[in-house]
Image (cartoon, rainbow, N blue to C red):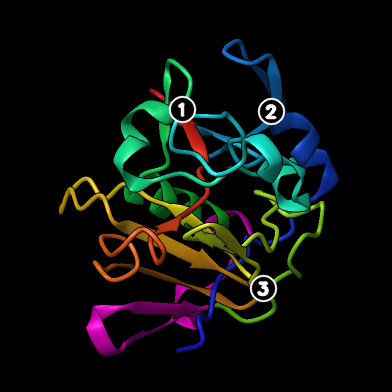
Amino acid sequence: MKFITFILLLIGNSLLAQTTSTFLDVRDNTTYRTVKIGKATWFQENLRFETPQSFCKGKKKKHKNCRITNYYSNKELAEVCPVDWHVASLSDWQAAIDFILKDQTIDKNTIKIDTIENGTVIKLIDHLTLMGNKATLLDFQPIGWVQGRKIRAKENTTLWIEDEVSQDDRFHIHYGNSGWVQHAHAHNIDGPKRKRRRFSVRCVKDE
């Protein structure tokens, strides 16, 4: 199945200048750009902190993707973000989408929702920005995911998202140029190590 994924809309430079800042992760002295979306403050970059289960360490750190992201197991999500930050949740994501739709005066009726095999939901919006455009609100880039011992480079970005309702730690979202896919599944997450996937993380500040 080809994933159809979502990139957040362009906003004006003046708005970005008013809502962006930086955060220093004192655990490894990495500085991240942050952006305020509505009432929430998001990392504007993928988390790169090295954990015992993360992918980008040792020789693997030389991979070009490891300069912009690290890839994590779903079993360590409660601990990967810095103190006073958490892995973006489904409600964080939905609040960000609602804010952007309102800010850009986009009619919600232009969003198409389809259910497909295994309950995945596809949501599409027309006229979205291209992947990797520096003016996009969350600056998503095509970093794919890790499967087993290899980075599977895809033309999308995949992030772990915490679903507070189901509390399923396998929930994740694939983003791309024209929409997004959000779902949880056991295959390639609970399977054998050679097929097990690790995804990227965006942190959101605790309220």
Say the numbered circle drawn on residue 13.
Answer: none
Residue 198 in percent (x, y) is at 45, 53
Q: Can you identify the residue that label 3 sits on?
A: 155
Q: Can you identify the residue that label 2 sits on?
A: 32
Residue situated furthest top in the rendering: 26
Q: Quadrant of residue 68?
A: top right
* Residue drawn at the location 34% of the way across and 77% of the way down: 121
* Residue drawn at the location 36% of the way across and 26% of the way down: 79
Nearer-N-terminus badge (3/1): 1
Instruction: Please give the range of residues in magenta.
Output: 101-124
Q: Tag 2: residue type? A: Tyr
Check disc 3 and report its element: helix, strand or loop: loop
Locate the N terminus and report the quarter of the image it occupies.
bottom left
Is residue 103 rendered magenta in the image?
Answer: yes
Q: As drawn, is 12 to the left or to the right of 190?
A: right
Check disc 2 and report its element: helix, strand or loop: strand
Given contact means CB atoms under 8 Å apart, are the residues at marks 1 and 2 in contact? no
Q: Tag 1: residue type? A: Cys
Q: CA distance from mark 1 to mark 2?
A: 12 Å
Is residue 45 rendered magenta in the image?
Answer: no
